[in-house]
Structure formats: C-alpha cells, structure tokens
Amino acid sequence: MKVNEEMSFWDRLYIPALLKGMFTTLKHIPKKKLTYQYPEDPRSVNERNERYRGIHKLTTTEKDEIKCVACFLCATACPADCITIQAAPSPEGWTTKEGYPREKYPDVFEINMLRCIFCGYCVEACPEDAIRMTGLTLPQYFRERQKEGESLGSSRSDFIFDRDMLVANNDIPQEGLSVEAE
Amino acid sequence: MQGGLERATGEKMVLNFGPQHPATHGTLRIVLELDGESILKATPHLGYLHTGFEKLGEHLDYNQFIVVTDRMNYLSPLSNNFGYVLAVEQLLGIEVPKRCQYIRILMAELSRLADHLLWLGTAALDLGAFSVFLYSFREREKLYSIFEKTTGARLTTSYTRVGGVFRDLYDGFETDARDFISNFPKALKETHTLLTKNRIWMDRTKGVGPISADEAINYGLTGPCLRAAGVAHDLRKAEPYSAYDELTFDVPVGSNGDAYDRYLVRMEEMMQSCRLVTQALDNLPDGPVNVEDNKITMPHKSDAYGHIEGLIHHFKIVMDGHGVQPPKGDHYCATESPNGELGFYIVSDGSGTGYRIRIRPPSFLNFQALPHMLEGGMVSDTVAVLGSLNVIAGELDR
Ligand code: SF4
Ligand code: SF4
C-alpha cells in the first residue's frame, strides 16, 4: 500500500490550507476543556480502580493484628530491593485465621519509597494478602499529610515508610492494587 | 559536498545540538559542523542517558526484568513488555493461550497508537504546529486512561508476565476501546487538515533528510523509517508472531524516504492499528489468560491461600532459583515495535536469571542513519529529521 501526496496548484497557494487549519482550531475553542490540574484535582484519584499502584499499606485483621507473617516473599520479589523486614516472634495472643497461635510477625517492615518503582510485585507475591496498595501516589500522599499540618518530604528519611506508617495507610479511602478478587 | 568542505576551510562553525535541547526529546547530542547554514558533518554522540538495562538483566530474574522493559521506550512500554516476554516464552518453548495473545496484540496496537500520537504531536510541535500537539495529546490521554485501568499505571505498565499477563482485561475495556477507535479517525482527520496539504509543513518536510531504499537497508533502518523509503518490511507480516497471522492489515510504504513520507507512513499505520484493534476485539476468544503451568505462572490466589500445593508453587515462583528457568541455550526474538524491530537476545545458563540479555533497540540503529540524512542539508532541518526519526534516548544507551 503506497502512501504519497503531491502539492497541487491549489496547495501551492497556501492560503486555503491556512484558512482550513484556522477553521479547525477555531472549532475547538468553544469545546469543553479536557485538561485537569493533575495532583490537586480529585477526579484523577477517584477514577482509579482496584489495579492502581499507589503507595502501600499493611493490612490488619479485625483484631488489629498485622496480617504479615514475615515470610520475606515480597522482599524477594521486589525488583528494586526496597523492602526491609526483620522477623520476630509474634506478640502473645495473636492467632491465625483458624485460631492457632501465630509464630512470626515483622518487627521491622520498611519500604524505601525513594527506591520503590511501584510495580506491584510485592502485592502479587504476598501469600497472606498482607500488603496492598492504595490509590494515592507518593506526592498526593505527602500533600494530604501536609494539609493536616505535618511537614513531610523535606528529608530522605521521610521517604522510608516504617511499619506503623504502612499500617496507618489503611485509613486512606482510595483503594489500589489488591489481590485478584475471587 | 566536497567542494563545500574546501570552501569552508578555517571557517567551519561547530554547533552542539543538545544534550539539552527542547527538540531532542531526551538527552542526546549531535555535533554539527556548519558552513553558514548548511551542515557539513554531523556526529551523533551517545552516552548521555546510560541506563544499564542490559546489566540489570543479569541479576534480575525473568519476571523482574519486565519492569525494566517499561522504561526503555517510554512511549510504548506495552510493546516492550510484549517483545520481552515473547522472547522468554520462546526460549521456554511455551505458547500462551489464544486469549492472551489477542490481549497482548490489543495492548501492543493501542500502544503503537499512543507512540505515533506522541511522535506526531512533538514532531509537529518542533516545526511550529502547536495545535496538532494539543489534539494528539488529547487522544493519547484517552489511551493512557485505558492503560491505567488495565495495568494499574499510565507509563510503567509492566503488564505482561512470562506465560501470560498480569490480569485479564477489566470489565468495560471493550466499550472503552471501541469508543476510542470509533472517534479516532475523526481526530486524525483534523491533523490531516492541519498538516498533510499545508504548504508550510510540506516545504519543511518534503525532500528533507531523504534516504533511498538500499541505503536504508544498509543502515539497518527498521519500522516506519524503512517503510517510508519504500521497503515493505513489517515483522508482523514477514515473520508473524503471536496471533498476527490471523488478522488482516496493510503495510503502508512511502517512496522518497524523506521526513514527509515518514509522516505519511505513520499516519497510515495508525489507521491500520485501528483496524487491528477492531478485529482483535471482534475475535477476542474466551478462556484462560495464563498458561496453566504452575512452574511458570503463579497459581490463582484461591489456590495459594487454600491448598498446600498451591502455596508451595506460589513460593517457588517467587523464590530465587525456583521460578521460571528456561533451559540452557540462547534465543533471539524480534517484534515490530512502533519504531521498528525490537529484538531481545537472551542467553540462559539454566538458572532463574538470564546470563545475558541483549537488546536490539530500533532507535539505536535508526539514529546511526542520522548523519547520512543531515549532511548536505540545512541546520534548520535537523529538528525536522530528528523529529521524523523518533529517536528515543532511553533506548540508545542500554
Ligand atoms: S511496588 Fe515493586 S518496587 Fe515497590 S516495594 Fe513493591 S515490589 Fe518493591
Ligand atoms: S507482606 Fe506478605 S509477602 Fe511480605 S513478608 Fe509479609 S506476608 Fe510475606
């Protein structure tokens, strides 16, 4: 299939093409604007579905026990090597779904958000549905926190999310990537 | 040209084009030797965006490397994902289910549209056509919201997995895609009105940076740049991979190999991609999306939660040295990415990590033809030629 265009006499005049172009652009002026102010406009956040890969959260059971069993699968799957876990024996009284005593839980669970590439491999790898993602990007998250009067994001250590911060992210209303619904 | 060199003795001017120039779309540098306004010599320099992708391939496992392919050609990450997993699958000797093949083609063609749209916008912007930029980005935005809903991210899609895809299409994908495809020709027609017969556009691109068919082959050009020179070579037709042999489409070719032909070829390719998307949607088969082999793809989550075997398979897929392990050997697999032949050469030593992953990016080879196209031309044509080649700096230095 050949594509070819030659300049005709009419095109050489060049004014008709200019006017046609002008007419095209003029037609667009009364149309609805399609742009939106990306981080501030909440529309972009609300349109996100259960696949969106935002910042992480560590899920908890109804008894507020961290679901994570410190199996290190997420840290192994992570291409950016940004998850640090230290396992410890679970606190007294923590039980599994079936009611047996739990063995391990993460004493330290840190995600270095400066290294994280938000690929979602950790969520995919977790066998306990213990780590999920929210619908907020890192800048949006910081903006939300700053609205609450916290000064965040000015030092590198602010970007290392520890276990408690990740658990607190359960309060973020926008849902992101989670394991596939049954 | 030789005469020009003599005349310029002692009066040559050296101009650095880039590394930071708004029209280079990435950090690349061309050193131009000028005599007045004509270019005597153009020397492209590499190394300003060295990324180490190939080296990363030597220590990330096969599935982890997918996230790296996103970042190679950042205009069409989905095509890169596709090309890479295809190479791994061929090395493994497996074939994914039909539904998966169709989904991948759908996503690859949509990303071809996104790539060409961005190319169109920026190439036109470089030559001063600002409205085209706005209109093509408007269309591209619609595509990106489809990508976001399907893959979870706009740019870093990481959609494919060895042996399948991350997830099946979302409910409503078909409506969104058909909606887009039905409105798209109208939007493209606007661009045709603004550019195709516009004398300013024609004067600035016609006969600019020409390359003949033979030279294009000698330089190893692929993709729209090769086809604009009149060679009807498209890997989707020449060596059909995935389910491309079940779909019909035409391969547009140009005649002069100049910037204008490259523009026309890309414009027509977009229409052909629309055809492919429509056909793929019409024929989208039902069935599973991943190969049913727990040694290659993750078991379904209900298996991993509920059964000990599922859990073991789940752990093995993720753990080092237990996941996807192609047999010893090597394999080269090339796909037609929006810019041309994107090839992955994988050497496996039988472990879970590639021994060597060599990438043959289209932009790298297209870029080497640049001096040939520029020399003897005017300095103002540099932007037009560079724009028409669509060089992605992220692919130049791996
Ligand atoms: S999203 Fe990816 S990079 Fe980030 S912690 Fe999870 S696996 Fe690591
Ligand atoms: S978050 Fe999940 S994968 Fe990571 S250590 Fe905890 S249980 Fe294992």
Image (cartoon, helix red, strand yellow):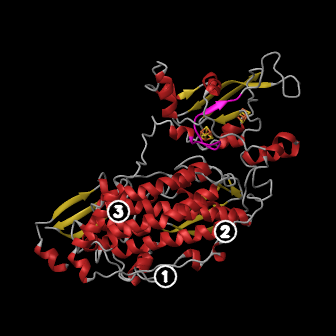
User: Which three-letter amino acid code belongs to the residue tagged 1?
Assistant: Ala
Q: Do circles 3 and 2 both sit on a common chain?
A: yes
When the figure is inspected, residue B216 is found, relative to residue B122, above or below; the finding is: below
Q: Which residue is mark 1?
A: B232
Chain under numbered label 2 = B
User: Which three-letter amino acid code belongs to the residue tagged 3?
Assistant: Ala
Which one is earlier in the sequence, the residue at label 1 or at label 2? Answer: 1
Q: Which residue is mark 2?
A: B282
| Residue occupying the point 73% across, 44% down | A180
For residue B297, side relative to residue B197 (left or right): right
Residue contact between numbered discs 1 and 2, judged by CB atoms under 8 Å: no
Badge 3: residue crowd in 10 Å (few <14, some 14–19, many ≥20) = many
Badge 2: residue crowd in 10 Å (few <14, some 14–19, many ≥20) = few
Magenta residues (range): A47-59
**Ligand 1 image position (quadrant):** top right
Residue contact between numbered discs 3 and 1, judged by CB atoms under 8 Å: no
Residue A31's spot in the image, x, y percent? 39, 52
Mark 3 to mark 1 CA distance (whole Å): 23 Å
| Residue occupying the point 49% across, 82% down | B232
Residue B99's spot in the image, x, y percent? 72, 63
Question: Please, what secondary structure does the residue beneath circle 2 have?
Answer: helix
Q: Which residue is mark 3?
A: B123
Badge 1: residue crowd in 10 Å (few <14, some 14–19, many ≥20) = many
| Residue occupying the point 59% across, 67% down | B277
User: Which three-letter amino acid code belongs to the residue tagged 2?
Assistant: Asp
Chain under numbered label 1 = B
Whether A52 is among the magenta residues is yes
